[in-house]
Amino acid sequence: MNNLVQKKYAPATERNRDSILDVLKDCLPDHGTVLEIASGTGQHATYFVEHLPNHYWQPSDPDQNSRNSISAWWWDVQLNNILPPLNINTQDDTWPVENIAPPLPITAMVCINMTHISPWASTVGLMKGAARILPQDGILYLYGPYKIDGKHTAPSNELFDINLHDQNAEWGIRDLNDIKDLAMEHGLSFVKTVHMPANNLSVIFTKD
Ligand SMILES: C[S@@+](CC[C@H](N)C(=O)[O-])C[C@H]1O[C@@H](n2cnc3c(N)ncnc32)[C@H](O)[C@@H]1O
C-alpha cells in the first residue's frame, strides 16, 4: 500500500494546530519527550515536532490505521525527533511506552480530542497513566470541548454533544469539574485553562 493510501487527513487539525502549538510552547517543559495519546492521523505530531526542536515526540494510538497514517505523515517530514507510533490504549493497565526508554525522559503528555470521543473509562485510564509515567512537575495537556459547571460553553457544543451521544452512548462532552476531580485523585494539580478558537479549551495539569 502506498503512502497516500495510508495517510489519513483531518481538516480540523489544520485549523487548530497553531493555537495549540502556541499554548504548548508556553506550557511544555524546556526539553524532554512528549508522549501524545490518541494521535489520530499524525498531522499534529508531525507539525508540532517541526516547531519544537528541543523535544522528542512519541505519538500513539490504539487504532492500527491511525498508526499507519502517523507513519505515513512521518515519511513526509523524516525528522529524527518524532518516534515510531506506539499502540497505546489508555484503558490498558500498562502501556508499551513503560517498557522502553525514549531518547530523553518523558516530561509531558498531550491528549487532543479524546475525552469526548471515547468512553469515560478512557479518561480514567489517561489519568492513571499520567500518574504512573509523568515525573514530578511533568505536564498533562488536554484539548477539546468541555462543559463548565455543568453547562455547555456554546450552542454548537450542545449540538455536538447530542451528536456524539447518538453515535455512541458512552461518548460525550465532559464537565471540566469532573476532569479536575479525576486529575486530583491521581496526583495531578490543575494549572489553568486557555480559551481556544471554536469553543474549545486547553486544560493544563502538573504532576505533584
Ligand atoms: C477524534 S480522534 C482525535 C485524533 C487527534 N488527536 C486529533 O485531534 O485529530 C480520537 C482518537 O482517540 C483515539 N482513542 C479512542 N479511545 C482511546 C483510548 N482508550 N486510548 C487511546 N486513544 C484512544 C482514537 O483511536 C482516535 O484516534
Image: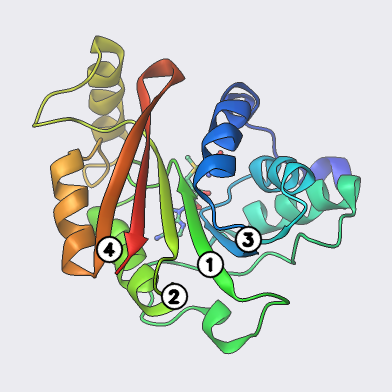
Name the residue at 86% across, 40% down: 4
Residue 45, x across and y down, in percent: 67, 48
Query: Local crowd at mark 3 within 10 Å, few (<14), some, or many (≥20)?
Result: some
Name the residue type under label 4: Leu
Judge whether 107 appears above or below 181 on screen: below
As measured in the structure, the alpha-carbon distance from the residue carrying label 1 to the one carrying label 3 is: 26 Å
Going from N to C along the chain, the mark reached first, 3 or 2, is 3
* Label 1 close to label 3 by CB (< 8 Å): no
Query: Local crowd at mark 1 within 10 Å, few (<14), some, or many (≥20)?
Result: many
Query: Local crowd at mark 2 within 10 Å, few (<14), some, or many (≥20)?
Result: some
Quarter of the rendering containing residue 99: bottom right
Q: Mark 2 = which residue?
A: 135
Q: Is residue 34 left or right of residue 205?
A: right
Residue 107, label in figure: 1
As measured in the structure, the alpha-carbon distance from the residue carrying label 3 to the one carrying label 4 is: 30 Å
Residue 2, x across and y down, in percent: 90, 49
Going from N to C along the chain, the mark reached first, 1 or 4, is 1
